[in-house]
Amino acid sequence: MTKTRPPSGSIQIKKGMYSMVIYMEREGKMTSIWRSTGLHATEANRSRAEDMLEETRMRIAYDPAFREDFVARKRAKSIPQTEGGKAAKTSKSPPTVGNYERMLVADYIQQWYRSAKRNLAKATQTNYEQMLNCRIYGHFRSLGITMAELRPIHIQQLIDRVYAEGCSGTTAQQYYALVKRIFSVAFKQDILSNNPADKVDRPRKNQYRAEIYTAEEVKRLLEAAASDEIYLPVVLSAFYGLRRSEVLGLRWSSIDFTSKQIEVNHKLVTYKENGKSRTIGEDTLKTKSSHRTLPLIPAVEEILLAAKERQDIYRKKFKRSYNKDWDGYLCVLPNGDIIEPNFLTAHFRLLLKQNGLKKIRFHDLRHTCASLLVQSGVGMKQVQLWMGHSDFGTTANIYSHLTSGALVQSANVIGGLLGEGESAES
């Protein structure tokens, strides 16, 4: 079977418009073919122009009728446009399933991501791009196989490579989940007769036992952090077990001092775009259950009111130099800058070291909160709701080892009812 590769191409600006330049063989010579996208050269149109270039490259490679028409047209002629500004189809039908079967797996994955990313959260985009660029593209490019030649062994080889390069089972599971998602789309599109990932064993996730603090250690931490700029996120994570993105995404509009409630409905995420890190707020949380309304604990209410008052003082003190981009957010620095996720992680580590406290991750405050609740006899279902876990099994799997006291209590109850003798010991 002949393997076709898409021609290379680029986006150029000509007379204030974005043009596609396709580099391909024409009459025995390598040549560049220019086609106008019909889009003005603005930053807002750049992504659309790149999407048009990618679609054109793929159709040249895998749609013979389109390729013949594209090469035959004169150099100055632009691609026909529809009323919506999108490139009109020049052949009567889209690429057939047979054409897609001849597509290289690496090219299909690239096309899948360009289509899928518009529906992905920014943080998910960053995670996917890291996996795609780090190993997935390179693995399937080196294999050089088409979609018709794809087999479960090729996916297993990728997973084996992840392990061989020193990654954990958790990382291997993430790679497996991504390729399975990609090829499930190909299966739905009838490009594949089955999903080859279904025939590969799912890697086992590493069992992680978090380092947690006792209640006394948490109190010492809060005392040490009292005058620190990350005091507020530390307090909120310790009391409510909030994820890092959730605590930094809290806004004053989420705190109801009248009804004494705090609503978790927003998050702060950092992602990469064109090689640069950007931080934004998003209303889409990890799961539906992550959206939750919790009682406002009196001790936390006091701390929040004091923090609100301090923010007002700093806003007046810094005047025009105060950063108003993050107005309304709880966790900001004195000059109004948002506390970035990576800064919080690094500064929390420094705070522990400077105060001689046991080393834990910031996320372990979440585990500490849940563990203290479980050890104090709070039911797993209540802990699940407090933590915002999507299902009961998640909570039980993580924290069931902490319920030995409850088991002893159960033993004593049944022993008292049915038998005689000494009580069980914890």
Image: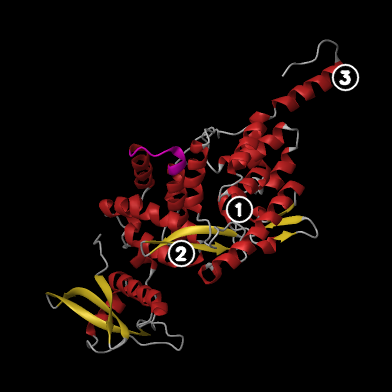
Mark 2 or mark 3, which is nearer the start of the sequence?
2
Residues at marks 2 and 1, CA–CA distance in whole angstroms:
26 Å
* SS at circle 2: helix
**Quadrant of the rendering where the C terminus is positioned:** top right
Say what amino acid the circle numbered 2 marks: Lys
Residue 128 circle label: none
Q: Residue at x 74, y 43 (%)?
A: 382
Q: Which residue is mark 3?
A: 417
Give SS at disc 1.
Answer: helix
Residue type beneath disc 1:
Val
Identify the residue at the far front of this view. Answer: 317
Residue linked to disc 1: 247
Q: Which residues are magenta?
A: 165-171
Q: Residues under labels 1 and 3: Cα distance? A: 47 Å
* Spot occupied by residue 90 in the image (x, y as percentages of width and height): 35, 83
Residue nearer the viewer, 112 or 228: 228
Identify which amino acid the numbered label 3 is placed on: Leu
Q: Is residue 190 above or below residue 405?
A: below
| Residue under pointer 2 | 117
Q: Nearer the viewer, residue 412 or 151?
A: 412
